[in-house]
Amino acid sequence: MAPRGVAIPDARERLFAAAERVLERDGPGALTSRAVTDEAGCSKGLLHTHFAGLDDFVAELCLDRFARTAHRAEQLPARAGEGDVARTLGEVVLALLRSGGPAISAFALSRPAAALRIREALESGAPGFDAMERAIAAYLDAERDLGRVSAGVDSGAAALAVVGAVHHLLMTAGPGAPDVERRIEGLVTFLVGGPAAG
């Protein structure tokens, strides 16, 4: 336990990581301010020093994880020409689902104030699904220009389908839901693995 009054470097990330562990191990019903700070090994007041309360904390956690995944997706176009197209795209898409995304999103949706805060932030331009969609479309365009994706693939429609599937799974799949990875891999392969691909 960190001594009272001693600054904790990267406190936000420490609390976020602790919340993800609590959600993964004990489920949404166990996520409380106390559970997060106990898991993080810090004083109970640390969460309230950095956030207005649990709803604000959960919203910021969601937005942070969306932004990380959007940033990772934005690196996709630079990877055009490398490796297998479906596998490369699948890695980025699955990163959000593997990061505790479904459990975090489900918990946020159960708290109206957190859900409203997330929606308002995304509408105001916080990186999220729109950024992922643009990045995926740009990546598929670049791969199509290289002849590694069929000329008939509509990159915008494919990107929308992938992001829509991720959104659906985030909102409906509980932690540890079966076949999530297989479903995403199948969708990505179907969308980019047409007869002229490769």
Image: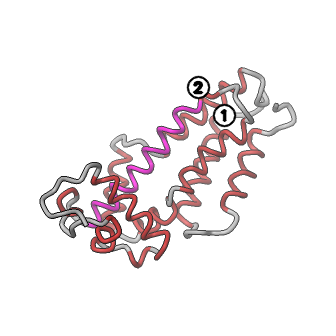
Q: Is residue 63 magenta?
A: yes
Foreground residue among 96 and 49: 49
Question: Which range of residues does the magenta coloring cover?
Answer: 54-76
In the image: residue 149, left or right of residue 165: right
Foreground residue among 61 and 16: 16
Residue pointed to by mark 1: 155
Residue pictured at 76% horizontal, 30% vertical: 149
Circle 1: residue type: Ser
Protein image colouring: secondary structure
**Mark sitting on residue 12:** none
Q: Which class describes the residues within 10 Å of circle 1: few (<14), some (14-19), or many (20+)?
A: many
The image shows residue 45 at horizontal and vertical percentages of 18, 66
Residue pointed to by mark 2: 78
Residue pictured at 45% horizontal, 69% vertical: 23
The image shows residue 163 at horizontal and vertical percentages of 58, 47
Farthest residue to the top: give it.
Answer: 145
Quadrant in which the C terminus appears: top right
In the image: residue 53, left or right of residue 136: left
Main SS, magenta region, reads helix
- Image quarter of residue 180: bottom right
Residue pictured at 30% horizontal, 60% vertical: 57
